[in-house]
Image (spheres, rainbow, N blue to C red):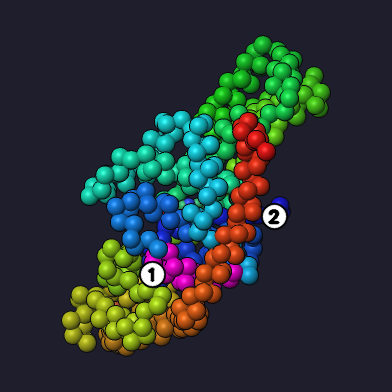
Amino acid sequence: MAIERIVSGMRPTGNLHLGHYNGVLKNWVSLQHEAESLFFVADWHALTTHYDDPGIIEKNVWDMVVDWLAAGIDPALATIFIQSKVPEHAELHTLLSMITPLGWLERVPTYKDQQEKLTSKDLSTYGFLGYPLLQSADILIYKATQVPVGEDQVPHIEFTREVARRFNHLYGKEVGYEEKAEDAIKKLGSKKGQLYRELKTVYQEEGDDQALEAAQALIEEQQNLSLGDKERLLGFLEGGGKMILVEPEYKLTPASKMIGLDGQKMSKSYNNTISLREEPKEVEKKIRTMPTDPARIRRNDPGNPDNCPVWKLHDVYSSEKTKDWVKIGCKEAGIGCVECKQPVIESVLKELKPMQERASNYTESPDLVKSVVAEGCEKARKLARDTMREVREVMGIDFS
Ligand code: TRP
Ligand code: SF4
């Protein structure tokens, strides 16, 4: 398989918790061994919604980077950087904005959803509308082949693919390419030529893969076309002769089963988290005081794990053997809830221990964190500059 390059970003939310670890970071940690990996702090994206509260961003950035390192992102394997330290992202964003139809942005589902959800903020801004395009620039500038994201981000990756396709279509053509392709279409005959054109339009405008496949099949079937013409027509379908920006695939992060202390999704806004740097004593206390199956009022009332948030933690942290012990012990009132919580407490503490050790190494020497990030920014910038040179050239603004 070709070498993969993955890029992913996270908005700077400050201290991360077990939900982030189990949902995202664990995945990043394993990906860094499999592919060239770039992970960045999306601080500009934070400003699209927190423009009125910029004071917290800087602290959040450093706290989050420390947590990434604590979680096991290894600067020797992965490139860690801050979006705003690679201003080429903004330049690409501006250039891509020239070719991005407004309708594409307005149709991205997160646009209306978030506007409706975050009613306390005025999100009828240019920056917020452009959020997905800035994200496209983040990805395309590195020619990423894969973007690990959660389900909610899939529309943004699909949008990115459309932008890349449009860019390549507009700027990726070789001299005389179009005329040659047009001549080849004529050789298909009027009926098939017309069908080819229709399928091409549907694919290029709507990204309809079925239309692409149908058009490819149509060309493969032709007996009277030379190999050169076949290749020309196949290339023409996808926008031209030269691929400048790479259409990335999304790599879905397996859905996290991590629930919070109250049984809802673990989230800062629900105040139900265990942070990665939570004191062991605090971890113990938080789990000890977690609600359990309300039917178990007394120790000898039988319970049902399905009605208990602690069970959901067992599901993430416990072996089959322990889970069986819980299921039987709970239903038969053979174990008490305090007893039942003990293995969860131990597993969480065991998971957090190496992270907290790494975190304290880094918090004790903030300069180390800064130098990791400075090095990452430098590496990222080099890649970004290369892409920008090509982009400027094909867009006619290369004045060097
Ligand atoms: N929008 C992403 C999120 O909210 C963060 C992000 C910004 C991102 N740029 C990116 C993710 C590029 C992947 C690739 O989670
Ligand atoms: Fe929940 Fe365990 Fe108590 Fe059952 S025994 S209610 S699973 S904490």
Query: Looking at the image, which residue is at 39% across and 67% down?
Result: 59
Where residue 218 appears, as percent x and y from the top left, is 68, 25
Query: Does residue 244 appear left or right of residue 25 in this picture?
Result: right
Q: Is residue 365 visible?
A: yes
Residue sitting at the far front: 400
- Secondary-structure class at tag 2: loop
Where residue 399 appears, as percent x and y from the top left, is 65, 35
Q: Which mark is residue 304?
A: none
Disc nearer the start of the sequence (2/1): 2
The answer to whether mark 1 is within 8 Å of ligand 1 is no
In this figure, what is the number of numbered marks?
Answer: 2
Q: Is residue 351 magenta?
A: no
The quadrant of the picture occupied by the C terminus is top right
Which residue occupies the foreground of this view, 375 or 150?
Answer: 375
When the figure is inspected, residue 303 is found, relative to residue 216, above or below; the finding is: below
Give the label, 2 or 1, closer to the camera. Answer: 1
When the figure is inspected, residue 306 is found, relative to residue 43, above or below; the finding is: below
Q: Amino acid at mark 2?
A: Ile
When the figure is inspected, residue 59 is found, relative to residue 112, above or below; the finding is: below
Where residue 186 appears, as percent x and y from the top left, is 71, 14
Mark 2 — residue? 3
Q: Is residue 246 visible?
A: no
Crowd around label 1: few <14 · some 14–19 · many ≥20 (10 Å): many
Where residue 371 appears, as percent x and y from the top left, is 56, 70
Mark 1 — residue? 15
Res. 183 image quadrant: top right
When the figure is inspected, residue 118 is found, relative to residue 13, above or below; the finding is: above
Query: Looking at the image, which residue is at 61% across and 20% down?
Result: 197
For the magenta stretch, what is the residue range?
Answer: 59-75
